[in-house]
Image (cartoon, grey):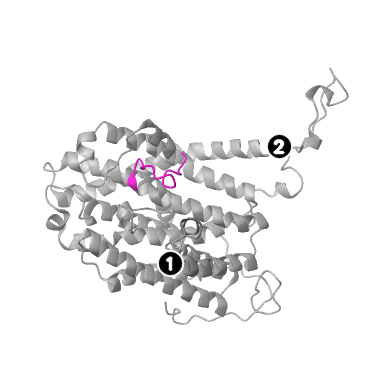
Amino acid sequence: MDRPKGLQCRVLNAPTPTEPRSTSGTPVRREGRLAALDGLRLVAALLVVLYHYVGTPQSHIWERENRAVFGRLFDFANYGYLGVQMFFVISGFVICMSCWDRNLKDFFVSRVTRLYPMYWVAIVVSFAVVHFNRSVALDSGVIRAPTTLSDLLVNFTMAQDALWVPSVDAVYWTLWAEARFYLLFAIVVAFGLTYRRVLAFASLWLIAAVITNHLDIALLDQVVQPIYAPYFILGILLYLIHRFGSTPLLWGLVGVAFLLAQHQVLLDTRHFNQFLGVHMKWTLAMVLFGGFLAVVAATALGWLRWANWKWLTIAGVMTYPLYLLHQDIGVITIRRLKGQIEPWALLPIMIAGMLVLAYLGHRLVEKPFAPRLKKLLKASMNFDTPSKIVPRGERGGGVGKPAEPTARDGETGTSARMFPAVDQDGPEPVGVVDASRPGRG
């Protein structure tokens, strides 16, 4: 991607071993929630929703084929699969932003509490809706429910894709790609996030993605993720630019990652055209993806700070529930109502209804239960070392005597620094049906 017009690289004066510095000699840091990213999340999510409701020709949702019902909107909605790639870029950016200055324990707690409460509820709700509407669901062309109780239970781990177990909702496959990114990034978190370490991680991952792309070694594919790595890396590099400022090295690596990403977009476009019978153009796909990436870059450079409307933050928190709930529930509802409401009227009604359901999911599930789970996890991980453990009766001078108060882990030392980073930890990537992954049916 061409460098945005007017972009100037900062001159580095006497950098430290870990952080570049601005011309004033102080580290360049832009902290605070970035509302523009919240808006971009919703854009990516709505693209995927539009793909599932309109743009996938293999579904039997409406009275006629999607192409016949929606015409040119169908042609545009084909490109909704790019919402996945867009979300991977945002994920790379946001994970760096929300986990900087945190240790591995904090990283683990934040990931679990962010992903699982709403996910568990979505599994139960989606499974129930499909179960009680099985005849409507299974001939839709896009809903593939687990067939055994064991498969259903495996879904609660979020690792069903690794075990080749059907997901309760087909869009959950992206969560496994995210989880592998987290596990890989946890290596850097364990040593502490610094400019040099994160830069080295992104560079080595980029090289590994190129090398392993055609080795056909299953283990390396699972760890390195050569198909998705360029998108995560783009987000990581843009966050480094946001936090520390522009350098020729960072923008050069952004360019390399972009070149790899555009090639993957080309392969995905060909795959969709061949196996789904659509006629997407790589040039149009790149206009959409490149424009999105340009907005992320502008956000990283601080050019969109003026876009700080409150509704953007609300949009951001709705995105993860929207992703988890929209496909199976939405498809079954459309099939129940088709013939009663015109498709062009039913489509916006369904999207609006899913947005309301997503907001309720955030308010009724994420907001009350995520903090409770976080508190439980933190308490269970703040245990004393064996040398500090003293039998209850021996504290304070023996049996029968009051126990002396003991300092809890986290009140002193390095563990006292709990969550100093900005928590713009938004929804996880939206996904499309498995057909978006070559080789997956």
Instruction: Decide which of 128, 300 is in the foreground and name it.
Output: 128
**Is residue 264 positioned above or below 155 on the image?**
below
Residue at the spot x=52%, y=70% of the render?
Answer: 207
Q: Is residue 370 visible?
A: yes
Outermost residue toward the right in this view: 397
Residue at the spot x=71%, y=47% of the render?
Answer: 415
Q: Is residue 424 visible?
A: no
Q: Position of residue 13 (x, y in %)?
A: 68, 80
Residue at the spot x=66%, y=58% of the render?
Answer: 192
Instruction: Decide which of 272, 249 is in the foreground and name it.
Output: 272
Mark number, residue 214: 1
- Looking at the rendering, the stretch of residues picked out in magenta corresponds to 157-170
Q: Position of residue 351 (x, y in %)?
A: 27, 49
Q: Tell me the kind of residue under disc 1.
A: His
Residue at the spot x=76%, y=45% of the render?
Answer: 412
For marks 1 and 2, give the CA distance: 46 Å
**Is residue 251 positioned above or below 228 on the image?**
below
Q: Position of residue 321 (x, y in %)?
A: 39, 45
Outermost residue toward the top in this view: 400
Query: Which secondary structure lies at badge 1?
Result: loop
Query: Which secondary structure lies at badge 2?
Result: loop
Q: Which residue is mark 2?
A: 383
Q: Quadrant of the N terminus?
A: bottom left
**Is residue 386 positioned above or below 21 on the image?**
above
Give the overall secondary structure of the magenta segment: loop
Mark 1 or mark 2, whichever is nearer to me: 1
User: Per the image, is 369 magenta?
Assistant: no
Instruction: Decide which of 162, 5 is in the foreground and name it.
Output: 162
Q: Tell me the kind of residue under disc 2.
A: Phe
Q: Position of residue 286 (x, y in %)?
A: 33, 71
